[in-house]
Image (cartoon, rainbow, N blue to C red):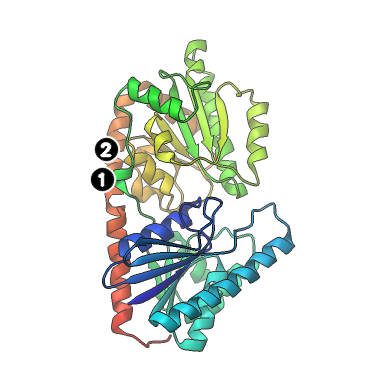
């Protein structure tokens, strides 16, 4: 079965959907499924094509995804260029291999391309919805109407998204919950201070972190206001927690924010207002985040909105407790004792205190959470997708 996957981003580009696209293609590809992934280039990629394995090839389009700060004209130009180059590439692939299925990941421009091929060549398609936080109404209109109506399946990564589709009278019979996954073997934690010291140096953090510091990391892209509000909530919870420590203890608490985006200045201003410059550091975008988890004692993700956050999976796989808000599917992958209410600074401060004072309790919570996380190994997630592909294959030619 020849499958085209259309994504605006793909790993090593940043973000959960980019990793999701790459990992699914990697683990699903095989003798039964040949995957051709069409995507924009990231900043690190200049090649036109990359063969990942015998059955999985990535074709990079001569486009890069615009940032939130780019002009409207640049964003429109990207959309047009992405559509044109995608159409040309899929046509070439269809002539050569005969495409059986298109699987696209939002935003809706990927679904629009799939719609065109569905109308022209009767090629069935699947659409994966990673979130409901697009700033553009056109995305929702296309997804709720044309894309949802013509797709065979509409995959959602959080079951709470179903309420949105029900409210807007979409076809909910097509909705399938398939969450994010994780490569469990990729993540680790330092075994001693010698290893911790080495990684701190490799990451270039020696000027801000000592080997005996209590390190907290918060990984998130600051492009959505609701997520940055959660980062600020954690900042206030941390400030309350620090107020109950003595001077020597306060000096050893280091919070590292990893990520960047349109609303990063809000976080910078709050750090300055709370006078936390000696405890909190904004590091921007970073590669090899597994090394940051490895030297951390605690992770946080106190967003106001989430779907199925990979940060929580990665934290637990690294042996690091994660304080998280009870949103999206977080409860599926985290011990309930690590959950806090949205916007509740006091709960954040209290849980910080407990985890700081009782490291063994934190390890027990990680152990409990790991049993939940193991279900979402990429192999298991990919097997679910394979079953869907096999079902479509058995009904070849079916158009909804």
Query: Looking at the picture, how far across and down is residue 368, in whole percent?
Result: 27, 40
Where 19 sits versus 220, above or below?
A: below
Q: How many marks?
A: 2
Identity of the residue drawn at 50% across and 69% down: 165
Mark 1, residue position: 371
Identity of the residue drawn at 29% across and 26% down: 191
Q: Which of the labelled discs sits on residue 119, or is there none?
A: none
Circle 1: element type: helix
The answer to which image quadrant residue 391 occupies is bottom left
Q: Nearer the viewer, residue 300 or 124?
A: 124
Where 74 sits versus 320, above or below?
A: below
Quadrant where the image shows the N terminus = bottom left
Quadrant where the image shows the C terminus = bottom left
- Sort mark 2 into few (<14), some (14-19) or many (20+) by Cα contacts within 10 Å: some
Circle 2: element type: helix
Q: Nearer the viewer, residue 191 or 177?
A: 191
Query: Looking at the picture, how far across and down is residue 39, in whole percent?
Result: 51, 64
Identity of the residue drawn at 34% across and 71% down: 34
Judge whether residue 222 can be spotted in this image: yes
Query: Looking at the picture, how far across and down is residue 365, in whole percent?
Result: 31, 35
Mark 2, residue position: 367
Where 316 sits versus 158, above or below?
A: above
Asked whether the residues under the numbered discs 2 and 1 touch, taking CB atoms below 8 Å apart as contact, a structural biologist would say: yes
Residue 397 falls left or right of residue 65: left
Q: Nearer the viewer, residue 216 or 338?
A: 216
C-alpha span from label 2 to label 1: 7 Å
Judge whether residue 170 can be spotted in this image: no
Identity of the residue drawn at 53% across and 35% down: 257
Query: Looking at the picture, how far across and down is residue 244, in whole percent?
Result: 50, 17
Residue 155 falls left or right of residue 115: left
């Amino acid at each position: 079965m020849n499958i085209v996957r259309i994504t605006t981003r793909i790993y090593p580009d940043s973000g959960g959907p980019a990793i999701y696209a790459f990992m699914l293609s990697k683990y699903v590809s095989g003798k039964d499924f040949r995957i051709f992934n069409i995507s924009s280039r990231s900043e690190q990629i200049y090649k036109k094509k990359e063969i990942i394995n015998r059955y999985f090839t990535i074709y990079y389009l001569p486009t890069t995804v615009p940032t939130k700060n780019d002009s409207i004209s640049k964003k429109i130009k990207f959309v047009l260029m992405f559509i044109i180059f995608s159409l040309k590439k899929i046509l070439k692939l269809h002539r050569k291999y005969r495409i059986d299925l298109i699987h696209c990941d939002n935003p809706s421009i990927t679904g629009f391309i799939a719609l065109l091929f569905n109308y022209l060549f009767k090629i069935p398609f699947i659409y994966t919805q990673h979130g409901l936080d697009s700033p553009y109404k056109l995305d929702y209109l296309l997804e709720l109407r044309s894309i949802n109506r013509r797709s065979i399946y509409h995959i959602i990564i959080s079951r709470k998204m179903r309420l949105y589709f029900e409210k807007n009278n979409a076809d909910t019979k097509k909705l399938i919950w398939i969450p994010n996954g994780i490569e469990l073997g990729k993540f680790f934690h330092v075994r001693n201070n010698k290893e911790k010291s080495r990684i701190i140096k490799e990451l270039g953090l020696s000027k801000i972190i000592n080997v005996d510091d209590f390190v907290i990391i918060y990984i998130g892209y600051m492009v959505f206001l609701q997520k940055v509000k959660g980062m600020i909530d954690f900042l206030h919870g941390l400030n309350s927690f620090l107020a109950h420590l003595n001077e020597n203890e306060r000096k050893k608490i280091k919070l590292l924010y990893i990520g960047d985006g349109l609303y990063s200045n809000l976080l910078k201003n709050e750090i300055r207002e709370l006078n936390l410059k000696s405890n909190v550091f904004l590091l921007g975008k970073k590669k090899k985040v597994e090394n940051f988890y490895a030297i951390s004692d605690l992770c946080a993700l106190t967003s106001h909105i989430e779907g199925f956050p990979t940060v929580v999976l990665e934290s637990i796989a690294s042996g690091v407790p994660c304080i998280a808000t009870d949103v999206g599917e977080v409860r599926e992958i985290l011990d309930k004792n690590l959950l806090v209410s949205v916007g509740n600074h006091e709960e954040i401060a209290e849980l910080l205190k407990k985890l700081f004072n009782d490291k063994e309790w934190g390890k027990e919570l990680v152990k409990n959470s790991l049993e939940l996380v193991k279900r979402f190994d990429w192999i298991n997630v990919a097997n679910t997708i394979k079953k869907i592909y096999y079902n479509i294959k058995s009904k070849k030619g079916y158009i909804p």
